[in-house]
């Protein structure tokens, strides 16, 4: 006890002495300022002395910048499903079932990311993923310019297209365990992504408006019609050596005061479909020119005083229309789809969401009308962890009285497909910010 009292007394005397020195320094600065003399100039960068000598802190910071920000994200999922979804995205939970019941666990995705500023001209980012433990792949790896004139920016490498809203988002940014139906139905199993280049221009306006132009070497295999579930016909990916997929997008953002904001976009893509040749026994048509037309909107309400309310509402919707040109013995085809979702924050760490999907509106010879409804409840313990319960009900082979399209693909069985999933997501390391 005596030793502790002596330590406390010594600490108190040291604090008092430090306070006196600070007061003297402040008084001296005030006197110099009143006399018109400049205050003491800032001290040169401090140095750190080690076994190799004295090293300035500026040099240490330069050496530190050579180390990229590295992070890892795990999405672990347990679930049950009546049958596998017909439109299965690459980062959806895959229980490896078909038309029978499936129950089990999966590592839905493991993502490892590294990013850093390369020099005054470029920033580099690499995202490696393992989806459902099926093998390592490069989700994105690209360089982005940082100092071009005239509000221009260039991205080159392998990346997700800016087409739509959810296509460019990684799994851990999604508000639901599964992606919308339109993703696998029209953009591809893993979305619209691949090696290519992008040029964007920020318009010099009082609000945010950016235009994008992209060229991607998208490669997709023809859809199989031999499995237990018919696969969606790919929009792009044929003749990848000679026919790149071209896209154009316009994105705008409008804030309405401190509580409301609106983000939206118009999208277009053109390419060639990798269908199966009718002459060789296929039913989907090879080398059909394809165009996608899309629009998306995101509206969010978030009160300024979040410390008291912890409430917010976000609404998101997207629509895609596809045109498959006549070719290989098949006539013109039009099909499309849309989804709408709302996510409500009702407490500090709790969110509830609902989403409705519909594709095959209109229905084509290769796309049946399919509907899906989903709800989820998310507990977000921090920016680095969340737990989610997700339930959905999918209905395929929907037909209406006005539907006169002759389907070239077999019907999915059974048509009703409920599913339930529990998802745990954790993030470690420094992860770069994602677009709004």
Image (cartoon, rainbow, N blue to C red):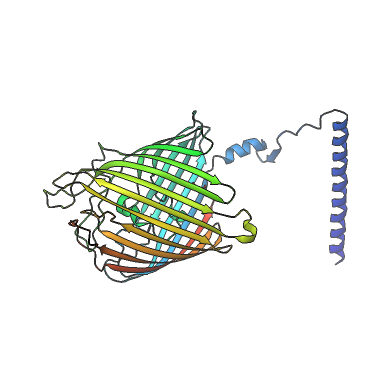
Q: Name the one closer to the observer, 291 or 412.
A: 291
Q: Position of residue 395 (x, y in %)?
A: 30, 65
- Whether residue 132 appears in this view of the structure is no
Picture mark count: 0
In the rendered view, does 216 fall on the left or right side of 326? right
Locate the N terminus and report the quarter of the image it occupies. bottom right
Q: Position of residue 271 (x, y in %)?
A: 27, 41
Whether 406 is drawn above or below 55: the answer is below
Question: In percent of the image, x 43 and y 52: which residue is there?
Answer: 170
Q: Position of residue 165 (x, y in %)?
A: 42, 49
Whether 347 is drawn above or below 304: the answer is below
Q: Name the one closer to the observer, 124 or 231.
A: 231
Q: Residue furthest front?
A: 402
In the rendered view, does 404 fall on the left or right side of 47? left
Q: Name the one closer to the observer, 366 or 137.
A: 366
In the rendered view, does 21 fall on the left or right side of 427? right
Question: In percent of the image, x 43 and y 60: which residue is there?
Answer: 176
Whether 115 is drawn above or below 200: the answer is below
- Whether residue 81 appears in this view of the structure is yes
Q: Position of residue 426 (x, y in %)?
A: 50, 59
Question: In percent of the image, x 26 and y 55: which residue is there?
Answer: 232
């Amino acid at each position: 006890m005596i030793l502790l009292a002596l330590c406390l007394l010594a600490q108190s005397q040291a604090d008092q002495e430090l306070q006196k020195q600070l007061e003297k320094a402040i008084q001296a600065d005030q006197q110099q300022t009143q006399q018109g003399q400049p205050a003491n100039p800032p001290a040169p960068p401090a140095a750190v002395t080690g076994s190799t000598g004295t090293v300035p802190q500026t040099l240490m910071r330069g050496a530190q910048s050579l180390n990229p920000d590295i992070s890892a994200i795990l999405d672990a999922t347990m679930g049950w499903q009546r049958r596998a979804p017909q439109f299965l995205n690459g980062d959806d939970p895959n229980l490896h079932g078909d038309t029978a019941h499936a129950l089990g666990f999966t590592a839905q995705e493991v993502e490892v990311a590294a990013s850093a500023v390369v020099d005054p001209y470029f920033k580099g980012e690499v995202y490696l993923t393992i989806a459902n433990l099926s093998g390592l792949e490069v989700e994105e790896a690209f360089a982005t310019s940082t100092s071009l004139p005239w509000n221009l920016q260039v991205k080159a490498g392998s990346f997700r297209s800016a087409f739509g809203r959810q296509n460019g988002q990684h799994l851990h940014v999604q508000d639901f365990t599964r992606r919308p139906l339109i993703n696998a139905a029209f953009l591809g199993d893993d979305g619209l992504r691949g090696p290519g280049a992008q040029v964007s221009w920020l318009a010099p306006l009082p609000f945010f408006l950016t235009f994008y132009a992209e060229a991607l070497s998208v490669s997709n295999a023809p859809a199989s019609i031999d499995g237990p579930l018919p696969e969606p016909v790919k929009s792009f990916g044929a003749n990848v050596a000679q026919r790149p997929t071209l896209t154009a997008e316009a994105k705008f953002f409008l804030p309405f005061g401190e509580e409301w904001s609106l983000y939206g976009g118009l999208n277009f893509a053109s390419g060639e479909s990798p269908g199966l040749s009718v002459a060789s026994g296929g039913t989907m048509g090879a080398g059909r020119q394809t165009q996608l037309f899309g629009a998306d909107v995101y509206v969010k309400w978030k009160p300024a005083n979040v410390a008291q309310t912890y409430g917010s509402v976000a609404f998101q919707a997207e629509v895609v229309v596809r045109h498959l040109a006549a070719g290989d013995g098949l006539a013109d085809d039009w099909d499309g789809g849309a989804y709408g979702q709302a996510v409500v924050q009702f407490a500090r760490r709790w969110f509830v969401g609902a989403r409705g999907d519909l594709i095959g509106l209109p229905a084509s010879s290769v796309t049946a009308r399919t509907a899906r409804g989903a709800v989820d409840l998310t507990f977000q313990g921090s920016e680095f962890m969340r737990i989610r319960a997700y339930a959905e009900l999918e209905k395929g082979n929907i037909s209406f009285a006005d539907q006169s399209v002759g389907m070239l693909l077999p019907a999915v069985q059974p048509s009703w497909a409920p599913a339930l999933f529990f998802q745990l997501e954790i993030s470690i390391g420094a992860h770069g910010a994602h677009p709004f």
